[in-house]
Image (tube, rainbow, N blue to C red):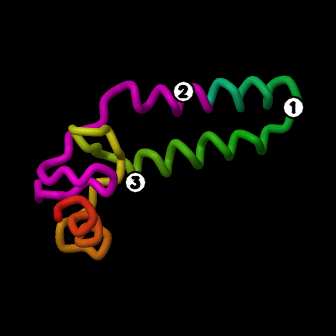
Amino acid sequence: MKMKVCSSCGYMGEPVKQCFESFLVDLFIWLIVGSVTLMSGLLPLLVIPAAWTLYHIVRFKTKCPECGNLDMVSLNSAKGKDAMAHTHH
């Protein structure tokens, strides 16, 4: 895995895989929206948790081991260079 930089705390290194707890947010969203959907009968509301879960799985595979931020970016990207410039003087 390539080295990355955390856009929040500036940690440089390899990100770690997300832990089970990060997907508890998905479960919470499913439970809340699912119960509202069952009570109201508005089945299209299930698009909300489905879209979030898909986005979460595709976008956030790893996290920063220092601060837990989900936005670890490549050192060579514009966002990575900006993060290094603001955290490593």
Numbered label attached to residue 41: 1
Distance from label 1 to label 3 (Cα)?
30 Å
First along the sequence among labels 1 and 2: 2
Name above or below for residue 17 compared with residue 58: above
Numbered label attached to residue 13: none
Q: Which residue is drawn at 22% across and 38% down?
A: 66
**Residue on which the image places disc 3:** 59
| On-image quarter of the C terminus | bottom left
Helix, strand or loop at mark 2? helix
Residue 66 in the figure: left or right of residue 28: left
Residue farthest to the right, as pictured: 40
Helix, strand or loop at mark 3? helix
Q: Which residue is drawn at 28% across and 45% down?
A: 62
**Residue on which the image places disc 2:** 27
> Which amino acid type is marked by label 2?
Leu
Query: Looking at the picture, how far across and down is residue 37, in whole percent?
Result: 79, 31
